[in-house]
Amino acid sequence: MNRLYQSIKLRPYGVSVALIGAVTLVGLGLHDLVGYRVVAFMLLVSVSILALLYDIRPVIAAAIGSALIWDLLFIPPRFTFTIGSTEDQLLLLTYFVVAIIHAVLTMKIRHEQKLAREKETKASQLKFYNALLNSLSHELRTPITTILGATDNLLTNKSSISDKDKEELLQGISTAALRLNQQVENLLSMSRLESGVFKIKPDWVDVRELIYTTVQRLEPGISKYRLSIFIPETMPLVKLDVGIMEQVLYNLLNNILQHTPEGTDIIVNANYDDSQLTLSISDTGKGFPEAELQRVFDKFYRVNGSKPGGTGLGLSIVKGFVEAHQGTVKLRNLPLSGAEFVIAIPTEASYLSGLKNE
């Protein structure tokens, strides 16, 4: 349907000739039954349809052409440009004026609609950037303040600080830097998705390596949870954008770390079947409110009752990156406790790595 619409938009004069010609043929067939005045309404309707699709020039051309055709083929005496009565002369003039006015008014309406859409888009963009700045102001300021305070303490009191305190300050700097880096990565990722020019670069990926590399990035925090990873021995190499998928897994796992207590079970499953890679990440936390399951992937959305921290970008980035792979990501609450994210991505596979048991 989109291709047909684009084709129509690219050939306004050709479509105008075709539509007026088709209506003319129908009018010739019905002329004896309905009369030439009804044919005028049929032609006027066709000009109105064209006015909804195109700018004013092809519509005016169609109005002039249809008026001449109506005069030549339908108004008595037929097959001449002579008009037999004053009433028909006025009728032809009225037809032409109505067609032109309709084209001009429709053009103005479409122009106003375009301006309204542009205004709405600008307002939406302004709202987006305001929300972005507001949500990031705290998230960026907090780790920066931590880093500045810790480094200032180390520099001004380096001779009097114990080794244990130095270790704690350095650990705080590291944690804050990682948090700051993650927020910057999310911001850059959302910017790439919003730009509309984002493209993935798929290559052969070892899913086992992808998962364990991502887990290592979450140390030492994830070590406080009971993590289980299940990957079949026959798991093949698959084609993915490894950097993008690493961030997808990082954001999902980090979301669990942020919203479930330490000691929670985290289960990661990977499977490849019927040309589709399936990754699931579940936990035994309290899950999500049922009413909010469909909203968690929205930009800046944070579940009610969430603890301070976070911008609400992580899961929306997950959705955007998975869909860039032509895949889907779904969330559901588990029957007993916790929640599960399931990613399904259609992709090629290769067993040349020797992972498949013959």
Image: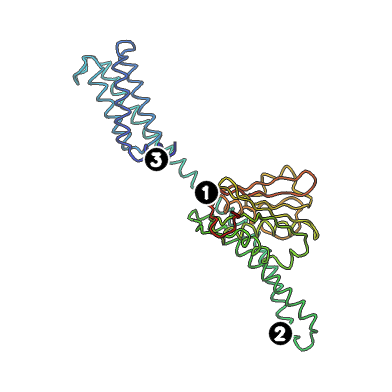
What is the C-alpha distance between the residues marked 1 and 3? 22 Å
Compared to residue 28, the image places residue 3 above or below, namely below
Identify the disc placed on residue 130: none
Distance of label 3 from label 2 (alpha carbons):
65 Å
Question: Where in the figure is residue 5, as x and y percent of width and height?
Answer: 41, 37
**Nearest the camera: 233 or 74?**
233
Q: Which numbered disc, 1 or 2, marks the residue closer to the eye?
A: 2
* Residue carrying label 1: 121
- Earlier in the chain: of badge 1 and badge 3, it is 3
Q: Are marks 1 and 3 in contact (CB under 8 Å)?
A: no
Query: Residue drawn at (80%, 45%), measured in percent from left and top?
Result: 336
Corner quadrant of residue 353: bottom right
Query: Which residue bears the numbered disc 3?
Result: 6
Q: Earlier in the sequence, mark 3 or mark 2?
A: 3
Q: Is residue 167 above or below residue 66?
A: below
> Few, some or many C-alpha atoms within 10 Å of disc 2 (few <14, some 14-19, many ≥20)?
few
Residue that numbered label 2 is attached to:
155
Mark 1 or 2 closer to N-term?
1
Q: Secondary structure at mark 3?
A: helix
Label 1 packing within 10 angstroms: few (<14), some (14-19), many (20+) = few
Q: List the single residue furthest toward the top.
A: 33
Disc 3 versus disc 2: nearer the observer: 3
Amino acid tagged 2: Leu
Q: Amino acid at mark 3?
A: Gln
- In the rendered structure, the answer to whether residue 70 lies left or right of residue 215 reads left
The percent coordinates of residue 313 (x first, y second) are: 63, 56
Q: Which residue type does callout 1 highlight?
A: Thr
